[in-house]
Image (spheres, rainbow, N blue to C red):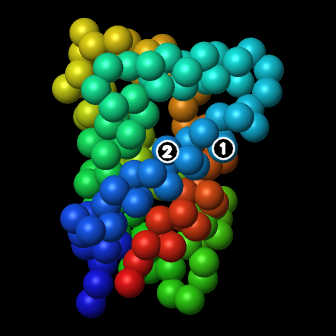
């Protein structure tokens, strides 16, 4: 049986997944409003200018942990679209916590790095943004499962 992580981490598919995740981030952030939206847009613009790959580099680094965290959810979704499954209020909070745990672990490994500091400044409100992005995340990742 093919798992989500096996599909997403396949070396021939992974670059496409990373590109799709970067596009999803761009889309999600562009739709944000208010002070929080402005801050996220500024942070994304700064990440784009970061040396060593911009937004794609952290997306690539997070992908293995994210894929493995989502494996059991992908297996449990049945015939339901993955985005709808993840966004179900009965599980969206738990899924967001699991994904943020992956990001938290990664952020600890880049402490002192400007991106690590940037992440720390947004972490307090991150869960609501992750929950809002779950439908798009699930739909994006499901496209790559073979």
Nearer to me, 51 or 127:
51
Q: How many marks?
A: 2
Asked whether residue 31 is in view, the answer is yes
- Residue 124 in view, yes or no: no
Q: Position of residue 95 (x, y in %)?
A: 48, 55
Q: Is residue 3 left or right of residue 138?
A: left
Mark 2 burial class by Cα count in 10 Å: few <14, some 14-19, many 20+: some
The correct choice, above or below, for 88 with respect to 105 in the image is below
The image position of residue 10, as x and y in percent, is 24, 69
Q: Nearer the viewer, residue 59 or 48?
A: 48
Q: Looking at this view, is 26 or 67 the one in front? A: 26
Identify the residue at horizontal 51%, vertical 87% (top origin). Answer: 78
Which residue is identified by label 2? 22
Question: Residue 47 at x, y = what percent?
Answer: 45, 23
Q: Secondary structure at mark 2?
A: helix
Left or right position of 119 against 33: left
Alpha carbon of mark 1 to alpha carbon of mark 2: how far? 9 Å
Q: Is the residue 41 above or below the residue 141 in the image?
A: above
Give the image location of residue 130, x and y in percent.
56, 43
* Number of the label disc, if any, that sits on residue 27: 1
Chain-order first, disc 1 or disc 2: 2
Q: Quadrant of residue 61?
A: top left
Report which quarter residue 59 is drawn in: top left
The N terminus - image quarter: bottom left
Left or right, 106 with reference to 120: left
Query: Label 1: few (<14), some or many (≥20) within 10 Å?
Result: few
The disc at residue 111 is none
Residue at coordinates 22% horizontally, 65% vertically from top-left?
Answer: 11
- The structure residue drawn at horizontal position 74% and vertical position 15%, both measured from the top left corner, is 35
């Amino acid at each position: 049986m093919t798992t989500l992580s096996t599909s997403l981490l396949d070396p021939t598919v992974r670059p496409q997944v990373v590109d799709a995740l970067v596009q999803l981030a761009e889309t999600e952030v562009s739709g944000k409003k208010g002070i929080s939206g402005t801050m996220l847009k500024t942070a994304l613009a700064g990440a784009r200018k970061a040396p060593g790959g911009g937004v794609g580099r952290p997306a690539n680094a997070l992908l293995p942990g994210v894929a493995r965290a989502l494996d059991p959810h992908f297996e449990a979704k049945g015939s339901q679209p993955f985005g709808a499954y993840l966004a179900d209020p009965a599980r969206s909070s738990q899924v967001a916590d699991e994904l943020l745990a992956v990001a938290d672990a990664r952020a600890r490994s880049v402490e002192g790095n400007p991106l690590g500091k940037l992440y720390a400044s947004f972490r307090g409100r991150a869960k609501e943004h992750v929950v809002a992005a779950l439908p798009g995340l699930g739909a994006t990742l499901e496209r790559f499962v073979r």
